[in-house]
Image: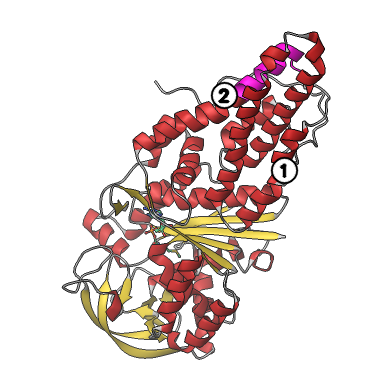
Amino acid sequence: MSFYVTTPIFYGNGEPHLGHAYSAMAADILARHQRQRGEDVFYLTGTDEHGEPIAQAAEREGITPQQLVDRSAGQFRDMVAKVDATNDFFIRTTDPGHIERVQRVVEKVRENGYVYKGTWTGWYCPRCADFKNESEIGPGDTCPIHEIPLEREEEENWFFELSAFQEPLEKMYVQNPGMIQPDFRRNEALSFIRSGLRDVSLSRSKLSWGVPLTWDPDQVMYVWFDALLNYYTALGYAREDEDLTDRFWPASWHILAKDILKFHAVYWPAFLMAAGLEPPQRMYIHGYLLMGEKKMSKSLGNVLDPFEVIERFGADALRFYCFREVSFGQDGSISTAGFESRYETELANDFGNLASRSLAMVSRYRDGVVPRSAPDPVLSADFDGIVERVSGLLDEAQISQALEEIWTLVRRLNRYVEETQPWVLAKDEGDADRLDRVLYGLIEGLRILTLLLHPYLPNSTATLLGALGEDGLELADFGSGAGGGSVEKIEPLFPKLV
Ligand code: ME8
C-alpha cells in the first residue's frame, strides 16, 4: 500500500524553531513506522516562499526575496536533517516545477467555471496572509493571532468561488467523520463551513512576488493556494524519472497545527474539487507546544532553539520528549527542566538501563549468546498483540498513545528483571533452565520494543539493534526470535547529564 505524509511548508521568512520541528518529527515517526511495515512511503516537507511578508522582509534587509528564501530554505533543510527526518523530498514553492504545475491546476479551476473577477474589500492580516471574516477579527480591528492591526484592503482580484463548495464540503465531512483528526477539530471545521462560506481572492494585484496567473500576469496567486498546492505538485517533479502522482495521491495524512486548520480543511479540499482532483484522505491537526503561556512563534519571540536542544540531548531525546510530554493533538507546555527530567528517568533509566543490563547479563552469564529457550508465558501474555496495538494507533496518527503502549512494556520488562532476579538464579546451577528462559525473554522483549521504538528513537535503536545482532527493522512478535545469536555489551545509550 502507498503511504504519503506531509508537513506544512514553513514560511521562508522565519527561522526554524521547535514548533516546526515538531510537525517534521511527527510526520517522520509515521513515515518510519510505515516503512517498517513494508509500505510504499513518501514523506514531503519544504518551504513556503512567496507572498507579502517575504517580499517585505527582504526589502527590510536590502536583499532580494530570492536571496532571502534561499537562505531560509537552507535553514529549514538543516533543521529537518538535524531532527533526523527522512523526508523523501524538500519542496520549495519557488521551484520551477511547482510554479508550472500550480499554473496548470489554477487554469483547470478556471476552465471548470470557479474563477471570476471582482473587487475585494475587507480586513487582511499580512502575517497570516489571510482575509479575515467578521468572526475572525480581534478587538480594535486586530489580528487575534498576531495581535497587530489589520489592514483595510480594497483591490480588484480574481476570485475563487468557495461558496459553491459549502455543501460538498459539509457532505464530505459528515460522510467521512475520520477525515479530520482529532474529532473536535472536525467539528470546528464543520461549524466554520456551516456558518457560511464566502468566495475568496485567488490572486493579488499589489504584489509581484508570487506565481503569475497565466491569463493575467499582472496578478499573482494568493499565496495560500500556491502553498497548499505543494502537496500535489511535488509528486509531479520530485523524481526526474517518474511522476509519482498516481502512486501517492491522494495524500494519506497532512500533519499541521490548528493555526492553519481553515486553509487545509476548507480552502484546500474545495480547490481540489474545483480542479477535479481528489481531496486528501486525512489530516491530523496537532496542538501547540507552549513555552509558558503562549504559542512559540517567530513573531511572539519566545523560541526554544531545537538546534541547541539537539546539541545537548541528541535528536532522539528531543523526538521522545516532545511526544511523551505533550499528548499529540493537545496543546502542552514544554521546558528545559522537563527535558532533563524525562531524559534521566525514562530514557536513561527505564530504557537505557534496561538495555545495558540485559545485554550485560547475557554477556556475563551466557558468554554473550542468547539462550535457545521458550518465551515465559507471563511475559508472552503482556506482549501479546503489542505490534497490532501500536500499528493500529499509528494508523490513526495517535503518536503519543502508541508511545505510551510501548512504554508500558518497557516498564514491564524492568519489573520482570526485579521479579526474576537473574543474578540470584545465576548462583545456582539448578536454576540454569530458568535463567535461560529469563534471559531469552529479556532479550526478546528488548528486541520487540526496540523495533517498535525505532521511529521515535532512530539513532539509539539502531545502535541497540546492532548489539542485539538484528539486521532488519521489520516489526516482530514476542517469541518469534529463535535465540542462539550473539549479542554485545553497549555503552550507555543515554549518558547521564553532567
Ligand atoms: O503556516 N507548536 O507556515 P509556518 C506546534 N507556510 N507546531 C507549531 C508551532 C508550535 N508552537 N509553531 C509552528 C505556515 N508550528 C504556512 C503553511 S502549508 C500549505 C503552508 C508548526 O512557518 C505547525 O505545523 O507559520 C504549524 O501549522 C506550522 O508550523 C506553521 O508554520
Say whether marks 2 and 1 touch (CB < 8 Å).
no
User: What colour scheme governs how the chains and residues are painted in the rendered image of this protein?
Assistant: secondary structure
Q: In this orientation, does residue 408 appear?
A: yes
Q: Please state the quadrant of the image where ligand 1 appears.
A: bottom left
Q: Is residue 226 above or below residue 395?
A: below
Front residue of 218 and 467: 467
Front residue of 436 and 462: 436
| Residues rendered magenta in the picture | 355-369
Front residue of 416 and 287: 416
User: Which residue: 47% across, 57% down?
Assistant: 329
Residue at disc 2, secondary structure: helix
**Which numbered circle lies on residue 353?**
2
Location of residue 164 in the rendering, given as x and y in whole percent from the top left corner: 47, 89
Magenta-span inclusion, residue 290 = no
Magenta region's main secondary structure? helix
Task: Name the residue type under label 1.
Answer: Leu
User: Which residue: 58% across, 58% down?
Assistant: 5
Residue 437's image quarter? top right
10 Å crowding of disc 2: few (<14), some (14-19), many (20+): some
Quarter of the figure with the C terminus: top left
Location of residue 346 in the rendering, given as x and y in whole percent from the top left corner: 50, 32
Query: In whole angstroms, how far apart are the C-alphas of marks 2 and 1?
Result: 22 Å
Q: Which residue is mark 1?
A: 475
Q: In this orientation, does residue 233 appear?
A: no
Location of residue 399 in the rendering, given as x and y in whole percent from the top left corner: 55, 51
Residue 306's image quarter? top left
User: Which residue: 47% across, 85% down?
Assistant: 166
Front residue of 274 and 293: 293
Task: Name the residue type under label 2.
Answer: Asn
Residue 5 shown left or right of residue 443 in the figure: left
